């Protein structure tokens, strides 16, 4: 490990120096917790296609891809050229514009559950508003989420995300709020149904990522069907957080892929085309809870402010350009991404197996993450399993730094592929894993 660390430092001297400056003026040297990794992060200066370059001139095959958002690669020409034409019209005006109407129409055309749309600026805001809609519509308080599920750091949902799960995730949260946000086990139909029954009388909704970002282990279809049936039975809403899976696992997201339609859905990342984006879509009667024209009294409607920069012409244009491209090319994009994802998952697992390391490569479509079980042949089926039954240091330190030294940027042992990842990139990822696995096993 010392040799790996020494090599990393040798390759990133300028990034190390800049991080020391950052620590003096920014808490922890960063503005987003996921962007820090030990001993310090590299600083990107340019990105194009499947790659980015850092301050020291190193080139990386990128698997983080802007928090999994860049499904068509960094700085695609069709978006860059389209935005260049719009920039002359101005940036943010703070007025309604035609592009948000066109974008909302396209979302309603593509996403199965989308009958009406509200835009905001981030995924965190989108999940916050979705929860508010669920509580306002049902006039109930309790929200259920999966153990280890991440829906952004809004105060309604930042519970039981990291180990130890019994401890709070942050200071500054009102302790009484935790009694209204509870958890259900993932991929455990019996346990989930029992949890729903326990709070049936005051249950506003269940929120879940169909392919959770912690581990990318897809939900079993029967599990999602059970959630759909039980929420309908008790009068609660089913909310899909598709901020990662929307437009990535298929054009219509996981709900289209798995054939299960939620009541509400949150979107972002891919949908933004590289711009800040959060979106809430869903049934018309639920979305109309925030309709000031139908509900003129403030105490009778749900407040969705959206944010100063919601619906900017630039962001709406970027989203439109992105979704148009995906829709026009869906026939080859999603089959190609699934094929590449499967090849990487097989290749990575085989590389570790050949070097005597117990590793499991989970994922769906173009998404994948490696885990290192603490016990041989341990069954890893949920985010909680990943948190409590795998070696995060081996994944986030040994494997990560080793891969970075080979020019591959991974997060949580993997990441997301894009249409711009080439055959050479795929081979390089697998070869690098083979080399790093050999180092880890020695």
Image (cartoon, rainbow, N blue to C red):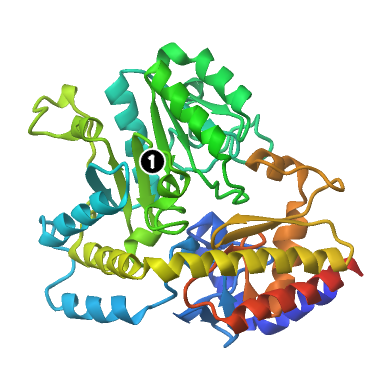
Q: Residues within 10 Å of mark 1 (few under 14, many from 20)?
A: many
Q: Please tell me which residue lies in front, 237 or 341.
A: 341
Q: Please tell me which residue lies in front, 415 or 397.
A: 415
| Residue drawn 58% across the image and 70% down it | 340
The answer to whether residue 389 is seen in the rendering is yes
Q: How many numbered tags mark residues here?
A: 1
Vertical comparison of 246 with 289: above or below: below
Instruction: Report helix, strand or loop for mark 1.
Output: helix
The residue under label 1 is: 127
Q: Please tell me which residue lies in front, 36 or 406.
A: 406
Q: Is residue 294 left or right of residue 270?
A: left
Q: If the image is split into quadrants, where does the C terminus sit? A: bottom right
Q: Please tell me which residue lies in front, 376 or 110.
A: 110
Query: Residue 321, how many percent across, how many down?
Result: 27, 69
Query: Residue 183, how many percent across, how many down?
Result: 56, 28
| Residue drawn 36% across the image and 50% down it | 267
| Residue drawn 81% across the image and 69% down it | 437
| Residue drawn 71% across the image and 78% down it | 405
Q: If the image is split into quadrants, where does the N terminus sit? A: bottom right
Residue 141 found in image quarter: top left
Q: Is residue 173 left or right of residue 232?
A: right
């Amino acid at each position: 490990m010392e040799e790996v660390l020494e090599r990393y430092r040798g390759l990133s001297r300028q990034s190390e120096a800049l991080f020391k400056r950052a620590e003096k003026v920014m808490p922890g040297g960063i503005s987003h917790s996921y962007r820090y990794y030990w001993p310090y992060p590299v600083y990107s200066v340019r990105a194009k296609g499947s790659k980015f370059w850092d301050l020291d001139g190193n080139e990386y095959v990128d698997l983080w891809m802007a928090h999994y958002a860049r499904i068509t690669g960094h700085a695609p020409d069709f978006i860059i050229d389209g935005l260049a034409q719009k920039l002359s019209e101005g940036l943010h005006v703070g007025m309604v514009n035609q592009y948000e109407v066109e974008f909302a129409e396209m979302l309603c055309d593509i996403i199965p559950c989308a009958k009406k749309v509200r835009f905001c600026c981030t995924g965190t805001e989108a999940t916050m508003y979705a929860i508010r809609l669920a509580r306002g519509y049902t006039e109930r308080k309790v929200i259920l989420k999966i153990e280890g599920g991440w829906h952004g750091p809004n105060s309604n949902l930042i519970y039981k995300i990291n180990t130890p799960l019994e401890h709070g995730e942050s200071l500054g949260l009102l302790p009484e709020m935790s009694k209204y946000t509870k958890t259900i086990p993932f991929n455990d139909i019996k346990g989930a149904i029992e949890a729903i029954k326990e709070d049936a009388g005051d249950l506003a909704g269940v929120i879940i990522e169909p392919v959770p970002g912690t581990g990318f282990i897809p939900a079993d279809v029967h599990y999602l069907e059970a959630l759909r049936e039980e929420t309908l039975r008790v009068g609660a809403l089913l909310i899909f957080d598709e901020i990662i899976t929307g437009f990535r696992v298929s054009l219509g997201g996981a709900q289209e892929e798995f054939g299960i339609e939620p009541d509400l859905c949150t979107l972002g990342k891919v949908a933004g085309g590289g711009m800040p984006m959060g979106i809430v879509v869903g049934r018309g009667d639920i979305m109309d809870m925030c309709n000031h024209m139908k509900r003129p009294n403030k105490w009778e409607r749900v407040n969705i402010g959206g944010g100063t920069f919601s619906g900017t012409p630039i962001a709406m244009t970027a989203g439109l350009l992105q979704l148009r491209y995906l829709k026009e090319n869906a026939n080859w994009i999603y089959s190609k991404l699934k094929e590449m994802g499967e090849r990487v998952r097989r290749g990575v697992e085989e590389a570790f197996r050949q070097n005597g390391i117990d590793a499991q490569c989970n994922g769906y479509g173009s998404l994948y993450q490696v885990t290192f079980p603490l016990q041989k042949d341990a069954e890893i089926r949920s985010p909680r399993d990943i948190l409590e039954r795998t070696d995060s240091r081996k994944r986030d330190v040994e494997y990560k730094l080793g891969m970075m030294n080979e020019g591959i940027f991974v997060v949580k042992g993997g990441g997301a592929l894009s249409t711009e990842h080439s055959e050479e990139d795929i081979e390089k990822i697998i070869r690098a894993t083979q080399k790093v696995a050999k180092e880890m096993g020695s």
